[in-house]
Image (cartoon, rainbow, N blue to C red):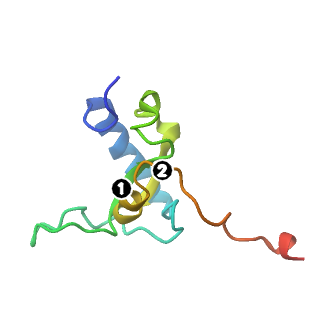
Amino acid sequence: MGDGQTSRLYRKHRIQFKAQCAASNAPCWLCNQPIDYSIPWKDPLSGGINDDAFELDHLYPRSTHPELAEDPGNYRPSHRSCNRKRSNKMPTGSLGNLTRQWIK
């Protein structure tokens, strides 16, 4: 088992997970906004960081749950900025969008 970021298995999983998310146009699981899967996390022209780029996030952070670091069931699509903002804490916020049935 690796550290969930540098192992060969993790790199393979990350590529596969990003392709699956891009194919289904999965939104960021933290802010529910679309992710532009075509932009690289690092801007090749300026060398700067694209905060809106895709980044694989771990539902249960690697630092607190290292045993889940390479578990694809623990992966979530996120924006780089959303993942960095959350850090290693569990997400907080709303329960999501209410359905029409709930509103009635």
Q: Return the residue at label 1.
A: 55
What residue is disc 2 on? 89
Residue drawn at x 35%, y 55% as measured from the top left: 55
At numbered mark 1, what does the secondary structure look like: helix, strand or loop? strand
- Residue 14 pos. (x, y %): 35, 44
Numbered label attached to residue 3: none
Q: Secondary structure at mark 2?
A: loop
Q: Residues within 10 Å of mark 2 (few under 14, many from 20)?
A: few
Q: Residue at x 35, y 65 (%)?
A: 81
Image vertical order of residue 70 relative to residue 102, above or below: above
Of discs 2 and 1, which sits in the foreground? 2
**Marked residue nearer the N-terminal end (2 or 1):** 1
Q: Which residue is found at the position 36% from the left and 58% from the top?
A: 84
- Residue at image position (9%, 72%) is 45
The image quadrant where one finds the N terminus is top left
- Could you tell me residue 97's position as x and y percent? 69, 70
Instruction: Answer above or below: position of 68 versus 44.
Output: above
The quadrant of the picture occupied by the C terminus is bottom right
Q: Residue furthest right?
A: 104
Residue found farthest to the top: 1
Q: Position of residue 103 (x, y in %)?
A: 84, 76
The amino acid pointed to by label 1 is: Glu
Q: Position of residue 94 (x, y in %)?
A: 64, 66
| Along the viewing direction, whichever of 12 and 61 lies nearer the viewer | 61
Which residue is more in the foreground, 52 or 15?
52
Q: Residues within 10 Å of mark 1 (few under 14, many from 20)?
A: many
